[in-house]
Image: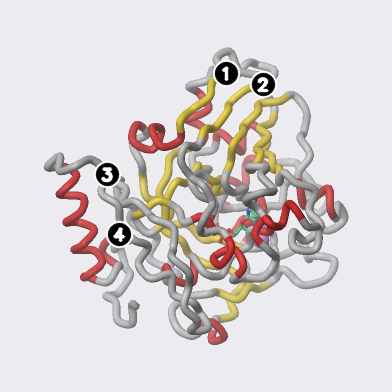
Amino acid sequence: MLIKSPPRHSLTEAQTTPESAYVSRRTVIKGLCAGIGGLLLARNAHALDLFGADKTEAAVRKPLTFSPHKPPPDLILTPEAKVTNYNNFYEFGTGKTDPAENSQSLKLEPWTLRVEGEVEKPATVDVWKLMQESGLEERIYRMRCVEAWSMVIPWVGFELGKFLKRFAPTSRAKYVAFETLYDPQQMPGQRNRYVGGGVDYPYVEGLRMDEAMHPLTILSVGLYGKTLPPQNGAPIRLVVPWKYGFKGIKSIVKIKLVERMPPTSWNKLAPQEYGFYANVNPAVDHPRWSQASERFIGPGGLFAAKRQKTLPFNGYADAVADLYTGMNLKKFY
Ligand SMILES: Nc1nc2c(c(=O)[nH]1)N[C@H]1C(S)=C(S)[C@@H](COP(=O)(O)O)O[C@H]1N2
Ligand SMILES: [Mo]
């Protein structure tokens, strides 16, 4: 795996990837362009266990074609093996390596996404077709978990706002509600409340309409140039970079535009600890720990993770602070 890499300044994810991986991906994409046999399948490049143990067969990840993103110069990517082996996805267990271990057989095809509610054109979308039609972009974003660790992840996806417009939201649409797959047969955490951390499944999340329409908000279908692995929310998940990670609901099957603020999973479980807004805010502590700083999981040993200051709105204040003008962010945490 990657030890040495060129300086990250103004490099795209493709350029910061070890050359061998980059070249082989390029070759695969070239093959696609030449029309050789449709989508070629690529094995997940060794789902490397952080603690050295060998993994069961990793789910197949397909290469994606996308326009690259020039990352902000201050960001250092979290290595792919950490992005895909240190996860929160309680449907597969509450331990950080449980999702990678328990989700590999999640059935991803077919996968449909229902969009309904306050829209003129409700529809059920084939997510794999959507991926080919959507003009995918890379977005390199900070990710800050409410547990005070963070990563920098090269997502591949498309803007949620552009996607929602296709369904013609009505003037009554004030919020967007999201729902994860409910399938206890496949998701051990949904069968057993101890495995699933006491969450009331299906996992649900929500955004205010203006947050959903903001150009930084994406539906992600990939990371590090390939489709998402199940543990990161395959085949489609939400990414809202200025909010705590729990807003980024995984493996979505339904999006409903609604008039009233929808319920959200962590808020239902512990309303005094997790709000609807969940904007990253170093000035508002979690009742049980400080949010002033975070452990950045970057290159190097997992336990060598670097402590750094948490930024208001996770560093995206210039782009999003005006969505909350006049709101007391201590009250609407
Ligand atoms: N359905 C579902 N979505 C979820 C979660 C979950 O348990 N179930 N965990 C959330 C939390 S707490 C975080 S920090 C992010 C983690 O995303 P990652 O594992 O891709 O880094 O997913 C979020 N989305
Ligand atoms: Mo999280």
- The residue tagged 2 is 117
Sequence order check, earlier mark of 1 and 2: 2
Inspect the image, locate mark 1, and give the three-letter code of the amino acid beneath it. Pro
Residue density around tag 4, few if under 14, some if 14–19, many if 20 or more, within 10 Å = some
Q: Quadrant of the N terminus?
A: bottom left
Residues tagged 3 and 2 counted as in contact (Cβ below 8 A): no
Residues tagged 4 and 3 counted as in contact (Cβ below 8 A): no
Relative depth, front residue between 276 and 230: 230
Q: Quadrant of residue 291?
A: bottom right
The Cα atoms of the two marked residues, 3 and 2, are separated by: 34 Å
Q: Is residue 277 above or below residue 50?
A: above
The verdict on label 1 being within 8 Å of ligand 1 is no
The Cα atoms of the two marked residues, 4 and 3, are separated by: 23 Å
The Cα atoms of the two marked residues, 2 and 4, are separated by: 38 Å
The verdict on label 2 being within 8 Å of ligand 1 is no
Q: Nearer the viewer, mark 3 or mark 1?
A: 3
Residues tagged 1 and 2 counted as in contact (Cβ below 8 A): yes
Residue 76 seen in render = no
Sequence order check, earlier mark of 1 and 4: 4
- The residue tagged 1 is 122
Relative depth, front residue between 123 and 70: 123
Q: Residue at x 25, y 49 (%)?
A: 40
